[in-house]
Amino acid sequence: MNLARLLARSAAARGDRPALALGPRVLCDYAGLAGRVARLAGTLRGRFGLQPGDRVALAMANRPEYLEALFAAWWAGLAAVPMNAKLHGREFRYMLEHSGARLCFASPDQAAAIAAERPDGLAELVEVPGRDWERLFEAEPLAPFEADDDALAWLFYTSGTTGRPKGAMLSHRNLLAMTACYFADVDSVSPDDAILHAAPLSHGSGLYALPHVAQAALQVLPESGGFEPAEVFELFAAHRGLGFFFAPTMVKRLVEHPAAGSADTSGFKTCVYGGGPMYLADIERALAVFGRRFVQIYGQGESPMTITALPRPEHGATQDARYRERLASVGRAQLLVDLKVADGSGAALPPGETGEVLVRGPSVMLGYWRDEAASARGLAGGWLHTGDLGSLDADGFLTLKDRSKDVIISGGSNIYPREVEEVLLRHDGVLECSVVGRPHADWGEAVVAFVVVRPGLPEGAVTPAALDALCLAEIARFKRPKEYRFVESLPKNNYGKVLKTELRKLLAD
């Protein structure tokens, strides 16, 4: 079933329910939203000549237009390519080229960055909002395309240890499974509820629009276009039944805001958190401030938002002797997911032993776009190999131990060390480098680069400022190291592989 039918269904049954709001102000109801989406879909298929299966990229800040463009792509039988709005122009270029996207909707800043690096295959770059945006709704409305359940719906770019982004192919079936798991394991939704999109729509928040559209709940876009704690507190008072998806660092900032103890939080219903490590002390403090309104999820781009969940009751089961241990876990497998912790051969390990987390079920991706080798590795034996290390207890609660892929998660965003290392090595004075993460109280992790300068160069030939400038010219700002440590050599094993565990010990010491 085409995901756009969730919108069509709500428009038919509850067309008068408010659909989109910008801050406290409601913009349209579900009948109006579906009508605009149908007309925009007509423009995509008619004026722009896109055909079913073509890719439409979204490089947009959080605005109501994002959801209109996303659902119009599905309504027209197209696949969406969501892109982090904080990326560098060259990173946009790679994703646009690799996906073969023919059209890109972009916010003004992102449109300028893409225009400077525009690939030849991109036929249309549409600035949103822009002078021509409303003209796109002049076409005759299109009926929702009858998409196959396994047709590509969401092409999400995620990186592996190589640092080269891979496109996880998510079908309509995958995202419908995610939606069903939301209702079963995360939260209930009614037409009187709302979801606040303060986290990027290109990631989990955008996916969680689906269960809320299915129930004709209100989609609230902050006027700031992002996460501002003071604004979030204002929206708690403006809307009822408000849920949202936040990275742990966002939860921490909300808890620490001066308004946390006195603001009207009657509209705050549910905070789903995930996308990075939540320290036990931080979730305990959040519960003390806001009460039992929290749900934790663990997922990956390859099984979006759908591996495990630690629901609201577990956050309040203080009488349980293992309460704090459970609170430090990521919960149990979601309804439609099979989960095991396995050894190197793929055999399940007994409770308490640490191994790789493997997952299978209808939420798991079809594979990686145009990368059969990576698909075969990632889905070997019919299981998604997450690259995360963890252990299960006897009751099925999963505790994550480490990430075998060395990914750094800072502020809820993934940062892949090799990608940063490859940029740093472009400096003529850098002989070797290695990038690791260190714990950070606010962001989860911070990026640290260990750098070996070429012998014989004068002192000051390689400076943090120069390396920063190089990173800012090549990759997104949030990926650059927050600290540079200049060392004489990097610790290595007998095969010449850098021992990142030793570097992390240096940071701990």
Image (cartoon, grey):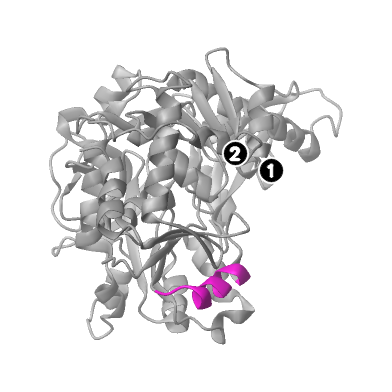
Residue bearing the label numbered 1: 485
Quarter of the picture holding the C terminus: bottom right
Query: Image quarter for residue 304?
Result: top left
Q: Residues within 10 Å of mark 2 (few under 14, many from 20)?
A: many
Please state which of residues 386 and 102 is positioned toward the viewer in this rendering. 102
Dot label at residue 203: none
Say whether residue 453 is left or right of residue 57. right
Say whether residue 500 is left or right of residue 296. right
Dot label at residue 128: 2
Please state which of residues 206 and 503 is positioned toward the viewer in this rendering. 206
Quarter of the picture holding the N terminus: top left
User: Secondary structure of the magenta portion, mostly?
Assistant: helix
Query: Residue 300 appears at what percent x and percent y?
Result: 34, 44
Residues in magenta? 230-240
Residue 411 on the magenta segment: no
> Residue 267: in sight, yes or no?
yes
Secondary structure under the numbered disc 2 in the rendered image? loop
In the picture shown, does residue 496 fall above or below 58?
above
Query: Image quarter for residue 147?
Result: top left
Please state which of residues 292 and 326 is positioned toward the viewer in this rendering. 292
**Disc 1 residue type?**
Arg
Residue under the image location 44 percent in, 82 percent down: 266
Q: CA distance from mark 2 to mark 1?
A: 42 Å
> Residue 159: in sight, yes or no?
no
